[in-house]
Image (cartoon, helix red, strand yellow):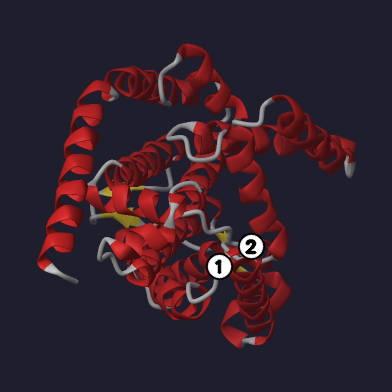
Amino acid sequence: MPVSEGTAAGAAVSQKTKSTASGLRAVPRAQLVAFAIMVLLLVLAPFAVYPVFLMKALCFALFACAFNLLIGFVGLLSFGHAMFLGTAGYACAHAAKVWGFPPELAILFGTAASALLGFVTGLLATRRQGIYFAMITLALAQMVYFFYLQTPFTHGEDGIQAVPRGVLFGVIDLSNVMVMYFFVLLVFLAGFLLVYRIIHSPFGQVLKAIRENEPRAISLGYKADHYKLLAFVLSASLAGLAGATKALVFQLASLTDVHWTMSGEVVLMTLLGGLGTVFGPVVGAFILVAMENYLSETGQWVTIAQGAIFVACVLAFRRGIIGELGHWLKKPL
């Protein structure tokens, strides 16, 4: 690239960074208030609502945030994100039950397993775009599903049962439901804040630039494939953190978390809450988990209700619940 062109490109990036920085100083007030309200509600919730239900919703909320990082800020639609959720669940459950790992190491092991799987699958998937990327992730996820169905350590359709929750750091007994809830809440908040930091960092701004106009980002000197691969691995790791935590909550790792329908559910959670928003995936996850929990007696009508809500959301709330709320308040949420 000639010096003049490089200087112009550098000036453009510098100007974009300055505008982004000034925007970041103006935005957080609304998001800080929303975050404080969310934390307050989640701290008080277990005293009024069944804690196990809340823990399930928090795990899926983190899973949806991880998925939203990929589709909302990079523009990559994955139909196979369940393989990261399920892989971490199996790895964490096996490490805790068979190898005797304490819960913190079991969760880290499960997260690392999903990160490694994300790196391997990302090398293949991120070379393609659009529907081709989505189909590759779906095909890889199905391969992973049938592998876990056949391999001995997962116990097939029975799954890994009676997974011990253990003692956190050798001090905190996670067998107590309330203690386990606040541990899951801390894990969720840590993952949520990490996603927030990523999307509001210079790295996150590059991801958004790639989403909006990849050829232009490449012309500015950014290696788009490298950025997309890193975002894919980060998303897989956070999905793995959710899956590993979920395995300890329910003391079970099963094929349900690896099945393609789970990948479809996280898409619905993200779209329902608001694609590309900060708090949308959390709201979408809580709504979907609440429907599955409180409408479970209706059988297959749960699926019909979910489909009806999805259609209504697409027709009336194209930005999602939080997206529309933020548009109405004229503040990004």
Q: Nearer the viewer, residue 16 or 160?
A: 16
> Residues under labels 2 and 1: Cα distance?
13 Å
Residue neighbourhood size for the residue with mark 1, other residues' Cα within 10 Å, grouped as few (<14), some (14–19), many (≥20): some
Residue 49: % across, % down: 56, 24
Q: What is the quadrant of residue 37 in the picture?
A: top left
Q: Residue at x 15, y 46 (%)?
A: 14
Q: Is residue 23 left or right of residue 227?
A: left
Residue 319 lies, in percent from the top left, at 59, 31
Q: Is residue 320 left or right of residue 55?
A: right
Residue 293 lies in quadrant:
top right
The reply to whether residue 92 is in sight is yes
Q: Earlier in the sequence, mark 2 or mark 1?
A: 2
- On the image, the x and y values in percent for residue 306 come to 78, 38
Label total for image: 2
As displayed, is residue 121 above or below residue 296? below
Residue lying at 16% horizontally and 37% vertically, measured from the top left: 18
Q: Amino acid at mark 2?
A: Phe
Residue at image x 68%, y 86%? 150
Q: Secondary structure at mark 2?
A: loop
Amino acid of disc 1: Gln
Q: Which mark is residue 79?
A: 2
Q: Is residue 240 above or below residue 282?
A: below
